[in-house]
């Protein structure tokens, strides 16, 4: 029902939480689906949002596709989901990432005069990739040893989130929405590999007796992936933390961790029979516990903890048919993808999140 501007983007959680609103479609088993292309490159970046990388103009190029949709289960109950395929060009690989989301929203009150329509929402969302690589020299957990590169296999994150959303109709064509959200996050990774020269080692945390202070001491253990490699003069090594006055190494090794976050924001919308304009803002704040502490102590380039992000999204849609609309959407972040892809933030990569970023999306939405 495009005549009523059905709105899956209004309720899909992270990414695009800045467009959260109370569901508009109330007819059971009616809703909308959206398909789109997402991108950023030197031709689309007409406002110079991203900084040019000296290693190449295409570093930081972004491309992807997404599919999103929502369905009214009854007059007050709304379900939705989305899937995103993202690719970011880096100096070392193409940074492929998959994002998924599913949620359900229940409308508690209707909008009457100054009383907003209020919905309660719960959702789950996450990201995964086959590999994440840091291809520049990096110290090993404050021990003084320097690795040439670090590769993390199968990184992923899972988030569960609760939202309270309020929407007001100011005029027949204008509305505003406000929201507050709380969430928890879990980041997991597979094997970790570090290269020293031309030898690649699998890195693990181990415990060994502390000969000086008694008890047990955490240590970094490395085993050569190919023991027959002539460049691997040392096939295995163990680096105890206490021997280098380095902090105790936790089981997650500062790449797997639990976190929490909250966010606040709002959106304004105007539409007539043919056009719709939306503008949304979101503030997000993260708490990563001991990971943030380790960054302030051990990060070798920039010991700044990046735990907040500001998102601004603008969108324009035009009806091509009573049930089909074309849209163009622009998203801006003050700290590139911080909170959008939680697993990408860890002790080794945190200094990469100080820069702004943005991208554009173009696509079609259809009501049913």
Image (tube, rainbow, N blue to C red):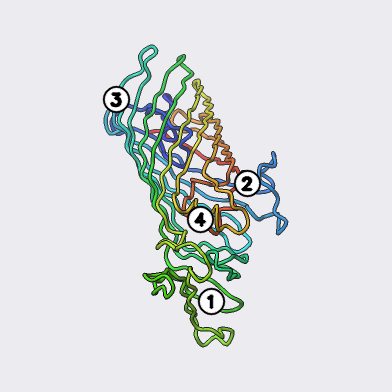
CA gap between label 1 and label 4 equals 25 Å
Instruction: State the residue in front, 147 or 33.
Output: 147
Please identify, in this view, whether the residue under mark 3 or under mark 4 is nearer the observer: 4
Please identify, in this view, whether the residue under mark 4 or under mark 2 is nearer the observer: 4
Mark positioned earlier in the residue sequence (3 or 4):
3
CA gap between label 1 and label 2 equals 31 Å
CA gap between label 3 and label 2 equals 40 Å
Residue designated by label 4: 294
- Judging from the image, what secondary structure is the residue with disc 3 in? strand
Question: Farthest residue toward the front?
Answer: 213
Q: Position of residue 83 (x, y in %)?
A: 43, 48
Q: Position of residue 137 (x, y in %)?
A: 62, 66
Q: Is residue 180 above or below residue 236?
A: above
The residue shown at (60%, 78%) is 198
- Judging from the image, what secondary structure is the residue with disc 2 in? loop
CA gap between label 4 and label 2 equals 21 Å
The residue shown at (56%, 79%) is 199
Say whether residue 368 is left or right of residue 254. left
Mark positioned earlier in the residue sequence (1 or 2):
1
Mark positioned earlier in the residue sequence (3 or 2):
3
Question: Farthest residue toward the left?
Answer: 74
Quadrant location of the N terminus in the rendered image: top left
Label of residue 355 in the image: 2
Instruction: State the residue in front, 276 or 125.
Output: 125
Instruction: State the residue in front, 169 or 316.
Output: 169
Label of residue 200 in the image: 1
Label of residue 108 in the image: 3
Say whether residue 214 is left or right of residue 130. left
Quadrant location of the C terminus in the rendered image: top left
Please identify, in this view, whether the residue under mark 1 or under mark 3 is nearer the observer: 1
Q: Is residue 4 above or below residue 161?
A: above
């Amino acid at each position: 029902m495009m005549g009523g501007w059905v709105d899956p983007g209004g309720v899909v959680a992270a990414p695009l939480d800045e467009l959260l609103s109370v569901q508009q479609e109330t007819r059971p088993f009616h809703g909308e689906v959206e398909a789109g292309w997402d991108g950023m490159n030197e031709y689309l970046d007409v406002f110079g949002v991203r900084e040019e990388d000296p290693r190449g103009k295409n570093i930081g190029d972004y491309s992807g596709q997404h599919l999103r949709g929502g369905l009214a289960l009854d007059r007050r109950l709304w379900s939705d989901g989305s899937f995103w395929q993202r690719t970011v060009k880096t100096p070392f690989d193409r940074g492929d990432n998959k994002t998924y989301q599913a949620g359900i929203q229940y409308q508690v009150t209707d909008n009457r005069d100054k009383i907003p329509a209020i919905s309660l929402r719960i959702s789950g969302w996450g990201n995964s990739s086959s590999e994440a690589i840091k291809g520049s020299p990096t110290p090993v957990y404050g021990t003084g040893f320097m690795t040439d590169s670090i590769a993390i296999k199968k990184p992923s994150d899972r988030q569960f989130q609760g939202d309270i959303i309020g929407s007001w109709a100011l005029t027949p064509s204008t509305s505003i929405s406000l929201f507050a959200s709380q969430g928890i996050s879990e980041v997991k990774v597979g094997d970790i590999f570090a290269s020293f020269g031309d030898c690649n080692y699998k890195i693990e945390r181990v415990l060994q007796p502390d000969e000086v202070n008694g008890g047990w001491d955490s240590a970094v253990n490395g085993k050569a992936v190919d023991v027959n490699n002539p460049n691997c003069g040392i096939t295995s090594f163990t680096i105890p933390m206490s021997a280098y006055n380095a902090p105790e190494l936790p089981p997650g090794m500062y790449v797997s961790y639990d976190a929490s976050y909250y966010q606040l924001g709002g959106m304004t919308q105007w539409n007539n029979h043919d056009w719709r304009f939306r503008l949304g803002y979101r503030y997000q704040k993260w708490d990563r516990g001991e990971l943030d502490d380790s960054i302030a102590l051990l990060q070798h380039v920039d010991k700044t903890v990046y735990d907040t992000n500001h998102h601004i999204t603008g969108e324009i849609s035009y009806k091509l048919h009573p049930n089909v609309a074309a849209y163009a959407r622009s998203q801006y972040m003050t700290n590139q993808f911080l909170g959008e892809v939680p697993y990408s933030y860890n002790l080794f990569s945190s200094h990469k999140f100080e820069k702004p970023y943005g991208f554009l999306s173009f696509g079609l939405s259809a009501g049913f």
